[in-house]
Image (cartoon, helix red, strand yellow):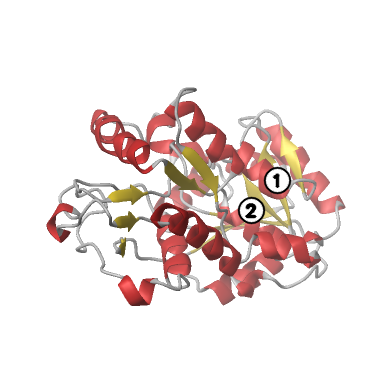
Amino acid sequence: MIVVDGRWTGRHGIARFAGEVVARLPWAAEVRADVPPTSPRDVLSTWRLRLGRQDVVYSPGFNAGLTRARQILTLHDLIHLDEPAERSKAKEAYYEAVVRPAVRRAGIVLTVSETSKARIETWLGPSSRVEVVEVGNGCAPAFLGGSTPPPGRGRFLYVGNLKPHKNVEVLFRSLALRTANRLTLVTADVHRAEALAQRHGVVDRVEVRSGLTDAELAEVYRRHDAVLMPSLLEGFGLPALEAVASGRRVGYSSGCASVAEIVGGEGVAVGSAGDAEEWAQAMDRLLEAGPSSVAADPAWRDRYDWGSVSRRVERAVTSVTA
């Protein structure tokens, strides 16, 4: 039996991946037995299912538990270990005592980018016999709107949370250097975004929004000239994908390899992630560039189609059951 861990729910991050992928798995409706809806890191949930060695648990996230079944995890990244603000002794112990043994026993682990694949291979070590499979990430159809011309009014967009590794404060400092530009933030961290705008004296040129549907967010992308993504570390970088799909170029930190992997030649790289003047110059260059048209490429659409992602997951999971 294949058991699907159905505890991840929501519209962003791992939960978005889980919802899109699990719903498309052909065997999910036939053999699905969701792990009890407690914390994704509850190591006893899988034990309560009384599974045997012939069974497989597929998780769209990093959660593993006590069970005789093999557990196929999706490690989107190792930010819990690599980012100081996210790391803790408890998380380190969980990855070492629970996640690593589960991955080694399964002999396979899934991830969402070549960047994360390389990092996971390093974490597992050179002697590991675990196959790390990059299944990718998808883009909702609402964002595939072609290459409509940017409005050309110096309007820039940031989408995401305001955790330290997102490096968002530099955008407010760069906005202070370009008084004709405006910045919209789509984030759940509304109060912190407003406080940053106040601190840097740019309140009159900053708009903060939250709780948007895909259709609403897609329209927001198209009403801006470009997207700014100053993250220092990402496992994937969904806003970058949505931006390119919407025909918008991306300003990004050159050291953030996963975003560079998505954007390719469709953006402007900033070498010094904390340099406000360099981000201001990137905004200048993005205004000069035309729309992105890479999303019109059938191969690009197939790579980032949720159906294609789900089929990659299906092949990986069923290769173990076979």
Quick one: label 1, few (<14), some, or many (20+) residues within 10 Å? many
Picture layout, residue 234 above or below residue 226: above
At x 57%, y 75%, the residue is: 216
Circle 1 SS class: strand
Image location of residue 45, percent across then percent down: 17, 55
The label nearer to you, 1 versus 2, is: 2
- Give the quarter of the figure containing the N terminus: bottom left
Q: Which residue occupies the extreme top position in the image?
A: 126
Name the one closer to the observer, 126 or 42: 126
Image location of residue 198, percent across then percent down: 49, 47
Name the one closer to the observer, 142 or 24: 24
Image location of residue 157, percent across then percent down: 63, 56
Residue at the disc numbered 2: 240
Quadrant in which residue 97 is drawn:
top left
Q: Amino acid at mark 2?
A: Ala
Residue 86 bears which disc, if any?
Answer: none
Q: Is residue 102 left or right of residue 154?
A: left
Residue at the disc numbered 1: 251
Q: Amino acid at mark 1?
A: Gly
> Which of the marked residues, 1 or 2, is nearer the chain's N terminus?
2
Residue 209, visible in the rendered structure:
yes
Residue 295, visible in the rendered structure:
no
Distance between mark 1 and mark 2 Cα atoms: 9 Å
